[in-house]
Image (spheres, rainbow, N blue to C red):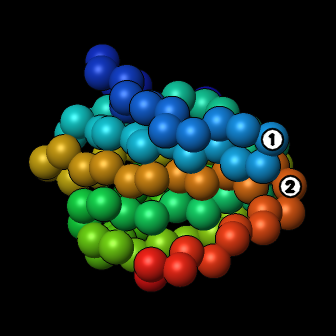
Amino acid sequence: MTFRCEIPARPTVQQDDDAVRITRWDFAPGSATGWHEHGWPYVVVMLVAGTLLVHDGAKVTAVPLAQGQSYTRVAGIKHDVMNGSDYPIAFVEIELKQPYDIAPNPGA
């Protein structure tokens, strides 16, 4: 099952290598990702506060999230995600393809 929407959410892949795929998702009001399954565990970080409507195939759950708030999910999640806010929202999704070793940044 998917949401009915005329405007799809817009993904912009920022990095895609052997270890991670980082995608920025921009949602107009009422836009949705389309039904999909995650092959890897992932992290989502909200760039704009808003409400995600998550359809799991059986029910729709409203998930209000603050700007900067993050959450994680395991591989195998199947869903469709819609912007339930009346304004544009965006988040960054980081899919972890394998264990990821981040070198320390001496300038941080």
- Between marks 2 and 1, how big is the CA–CA gap? 8 Å
* Marking on residue 18: 1
Q: How many numbered markers are drawn? A: 2
Q: In what quadrant of the picture does the C terminus appear?
A: bottom left
Q: Is residue 56 above or below residue 63?
A: above
- Farthest residue to the top: give it: 6
14 left or right of 30 in image: right
Q: Residue furthest right?
A: 98
Answer above or below: position of 22 versus 108. above
Image coordinates for residue 35, horizontal then vertical, percent: 60, 31
Residue 100 occupies quadrant: bottom right
Identify the residue position indicated by label 2 in the image.
98
Residue type at mark 1? Asp
Tell me if residue 19 can be seen: yes
Amino acid at dot 2 = Gln
Residue 102 higher or lower than 26, as above or below: below
- Residue 64: image tag: none
Task: Give whichever of 12, 81 is nearer the camera.
Answer: 12
| Contact between labelled residues 1 and 2, with CB atoms less than 8 Å apart | yes
